[in-house]
Image: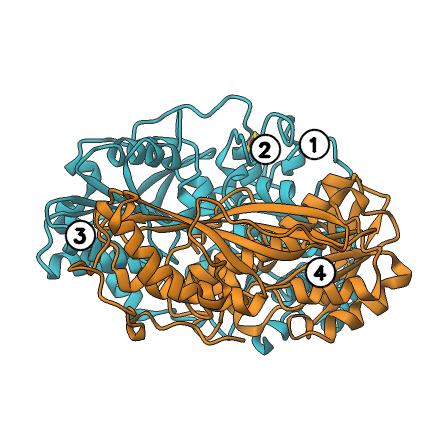
Chain colours: A orange, B cyan
Amino acid sequence: MIDPVDPAAWVCPLPLRNHDRIVTGHGGGGQMSGELVEHIFLPAFGRSAVAGLHDSATMDPPVDGGRLAFSTDSFVVSPLFFAGGDIGRLAVNGTVNDLAMSGARPLALSAAFILGEGLELAVLAAVAESMGRAAQTAGVKVATGDTKVVESAGDEVLYINSSGIGVVPPKVDIRPGRAAAGDAVLLSGPIGEHGIAVMSQRSGLEFGTGVQSDTAPLAGMVASMLGACADIHVLRDPTRGGLAGALCEIAAGAGVGIEFDEDSVPVPDEVAAACAFLGLDPTHVANEGKLVAIVPADAADEVLAAMRSQPEGEGAVRIGHVVADHPGVVAAYTPLGALRVVDQPLGEQLPRIC
Amino acid sequence: MKYLDEFRDPELARSLLAEVEATVTRPWSIMEVCGGQTHSIIRNGIDQVLDDRITLLHGPGCPVCVTPLGIIDSALEIAARPEVVFCSFGDMLRVPGSDCDLFSVKARGADVRVVYSPLDAVQVAADNPDREVVFFAVGFETTAPANAMSVHMARKRGLTNYTVLVSHVLVPPAIEAIVESEASRVDGFLAAGHVCSVMGTGQYEPLAEEHGVPVVITGFEPLDILDGIRRTVAQLEAGEARVENAYPRVVTSQGNQSAQDMLAEVFTECDRSWRGIGEIPSSGWRLADEYRAFDAELRFGVGDTAVPEPERCRSGEVLQGLIRPDECEAFGRDCTPRSPLGATMVSSEGACAAYHQYRRLDGVAVSP
Ligand code: SF4
């Protein structure tokens, strides 16, 4: 795990004219934009940046065959810095994980920033630095980028859009539609940490304060899982919508039912306590460093062992199986032995009144 | 977590279930009063594993569900005003008023904020002296003390831009209305522990005595509820009708004295209408006369006008345990969490929502 960045401790490598905050000119594509690139982004992305400042990055095509995977995501998290991570690291890991969920080895990312006027440069620099470190850890390059500035009424606005490309090895075919009755459902570790870490910080509540975001790049673990079984059927990272959301999407996508044992899903004590306090279901809470794998039952043990051999999958468990009954519906066995439907959350999670 | 695991232990659950089975000799109907208990029952499938002779009826104890349409409409009207910052607990935001909800008003530009405590709303008022800050004070005896405290604090801090839109309701009058109704099928009650943690257990004693119904105070974990059912069945089978505290780790007979003092200072009892049920005498609180300056209804000139419910919604019957949510014809067809007809389908504690969320295994045709 890399250390979280402390924005207060970050120092810009070189002074940026006389500004310590983002002004409209920083998004204009002129000298001031150039200064941002030169003094913030390039030093921050460091060795993980693709050299050169052309309009587009160029890369050699992969030589080992396979298919290209291409993915994009936008990151709008508030607060920008939270226990265990920040928006920059989230953007890199999130995009890397989107690629990894199709079995791809990530090659390069883009980083497009939308910044609010008045954002402190030190904050931008700290985020960029964190992105650089995360990219290095994940083994990808930040190949291209962009900056735009928007008016903002005193709020701290920093949004990141990141796209990524990667290579899916030959013969690997991972997609939701491949989940089949009899398959095993594996989960890479404890759930709910990211959502609770962010929520507790956002609301300033006295709960879950020891919980750290689990944000982590998963491509390495996926590679070792594919080494154990190239025929993995489905991979999904249970981000927004949580474990329940991910399983529901798989069940709907493949027209199968999924059943799991509530007791077998690891929920850290502090996450459970915070969820109980807020009236949330841990299976609905977001994760940023976990994955769900649907694999042929006879390969389940080997894939599980491969997951557990990696730091990101230390806590991997088998939680259930795919069934032909109740197509499109996910159901859980409760500790009392009853079977209940597991629904997707409707929208934003709202802590209840009492 | 140890604290939670202890109250979810499947072994203990099985022994409680076996004890109920061994005691029961005839059918009984037990109402859990609080929506939190309903949610726990349906989520954990307690009704699925319980002896067939025990029927669980779901009660009126969901604060979001019983807040009258007229007050929601007042909230929407106030929130839409440009000078207002409207603060609310999160789960009120999706409750439908006559034609929209707080989320839609927010999307149209209103300043609607989710707060976790009414004291946060007081702070918003202190930070924004040129805005009118309104807090939506809903809920049972549980949330009322903190809401009362916010008004008290606002007065102490000399804030003139803080008001509360009050819609507080009280549990015992609702239970009384249910047992007195002709249609009632309730033999015993599981009362909500968190309400009693504030008010104590004394209020329930005349109820149990006069109406001959056992009232067992329980918590919200599966074992709390099973233990409550076990004790209620034991009383019923023995022909007894007492108040029993099955939640002593949280509830004392006196309750929380300082919370009660705060309530007595800021609020005064009043008649309240309950969404779907109608008016119940002395079943709520409003601001006391010396705190009327903090009343949002007065400041903004909105009244709790009676607004008719959508005709097809049977939430009134659901809230009184007269029908199960899936016995409503609109359930899962014309009424879903995405396009709800009644508040019981919206609230995270609503019985219709609980059934929709956890009980659609065979009803896959029922669209989410
Ligand atoms: S299912 Fe919908 S329409 Fe029927 S009672 Fe419940 S909320 Fe009302």
Residues at marks 4 and 2, CA–CA distance in whole angstroms? 39 Å
Amino acid type, label 2: Thr
What quarter of the picture does the C terminus of chain A occupy? bottom left
Looking at the image, which residue sits at the far right?
A298
What residue does disc 3 label?
B125
Cβ atoms at labels 2 and 1 below 8 Å apart: yes
Q: Is residue A308 left or right of residue A267?
A: right
Residues at marks 2 and 1, CA–CA distance in whole angstroms? 9 Å
Q: The residue marked by circle 1 belongs to what chain?
A: B
Q: Nearer the viewer, mark 3 or mark 4?
A: 3
Q: Are marks 4 and 1 on the same chain?
A: yes
Q: The residue marked by circle 3 belongs to what chain?
A: B
Amino acid type, label 1: Val
Secondary structure at badge 2 equals loop
What residue does disc 2 label?
B336
Q: Report x, y in % for residue B321.
A: 59, 41
Residue depicted at 72% across the width and 69% down the height = A316
What residue does disc 1 label?
B366
What residue does disc 4 label?
B237
Secondary structure at badge 4 equals helix
Nearest the viewer among A101 and B309 is A101
Amino acid type, label 3: Ala
- Beta carbon of the mark 2 residue lies under 8 A of ligand 1: no
Q: Earlier in the sequence, mark 2 or mark 1?
A: 2
Q: Is residue A147 visible?
A: yes
Q: Earlier in the sequence, mark 3 or mark 4?
A: 3
Cβ atoms at labels 4 and 1 below 8 Å apart: no
Q: Nearer the viewer, mark 4 or mark 1?
A: 1
